[in-house]
Amino acid sequence: MFAIRKARYEDAEAIANIHVKTWKSTYTDLLEERDLSNMTYENRKALWETILRIQREEQATYVIYNEEKIVGFISGGPERTKRFAYDAEIYTIYLLDDYQRKGLGARLLKAFAQSMKERGHQSLLVWVLKQNPSSRFYERYQAKPVGQEDTTIGEGIYQETAYGWKDIEELLALLEGVSESKS
């Protein structure tokens, strides 16, 4: 049984572990080793402690967990670039490898989209590294590619694709049958 709740400061360690493990397993074939190795547990833990300590009202971070541990998270808030006609953005979404393809990502997406809707947002954007197989997850829920740009990771330059949902209500309708179990 999995449940979703808002992340708390004491979740920083678990979130950092998930962030690093899934980053390295997801991007092994997409990034150069020197750029992949820049992601460390220590810098992610410090980052997540800062994010969770501040807890900005316009942003949201949720974790999905079972009785044993946190297995994934999603975070985001207002769209950061202001170059697209989207007002909310998923900054990060990661699930441990063993918990992927079990509907947990859809549950996180639903909780986050609902949260953004409650904050008055009407559309949603997410950036995905080109050739990342996870882009199929967003396409499954009818996200459309809306832009591409280069991003710097470590010393490398990589291409990202922005996927968007023009209408959060439509996304939530697609996720209607997904169990939420949010606390």
Image (spheres, rainbow, N blue to C red):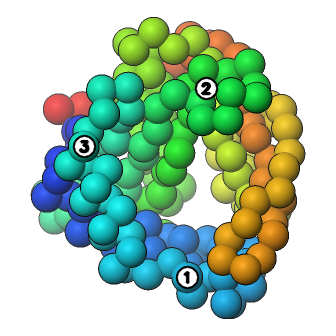
Disc 3 secondary structure class:
helix
What's under tag 3, amino acid-wise?
Ile
Kindly identify which residue carries mark 3: 54
Please say whether residue 67 is visible from this viewpoint: yes
State which tag comes first along the sequence, 2 or 3.
Answer: 3
Q: Residue at x 76, y 29 (%)?
A: 83
In the rendered image, residue 70, in percent from the top left (x then y), is placed at 25, 59
Q: How far is mark 1 from mark 2, CA to CA?
A: 28 Å
Kindly identify which residue carries mark 1: 38
Judge by depth and name the residue closer to the eye, 134 or 13. 13
Q: Residue at x 45, y 74 (%)?
A: 20
| Within-10-Å neighbours for mark 3: few <14, some 14–19, many 20+ | few
In the rendered image, residue 23, in percent from the top left (x then y), is placed at 54, 71
Kindly identify which residue carries mark 2: 124
What's under tag 1, amino acid-wise?
Asn
Disc 2 secondary structure class:
strand
Disc 1 secondary structure class:
loop
Judge by depth and name the residue closer to the eye, 38 or 108. 38
Kindly report which numbered mark, 2 or 3, lies closer to the viewer in this rendering. 3
The quarter of the picture where residue 75 lies is top left
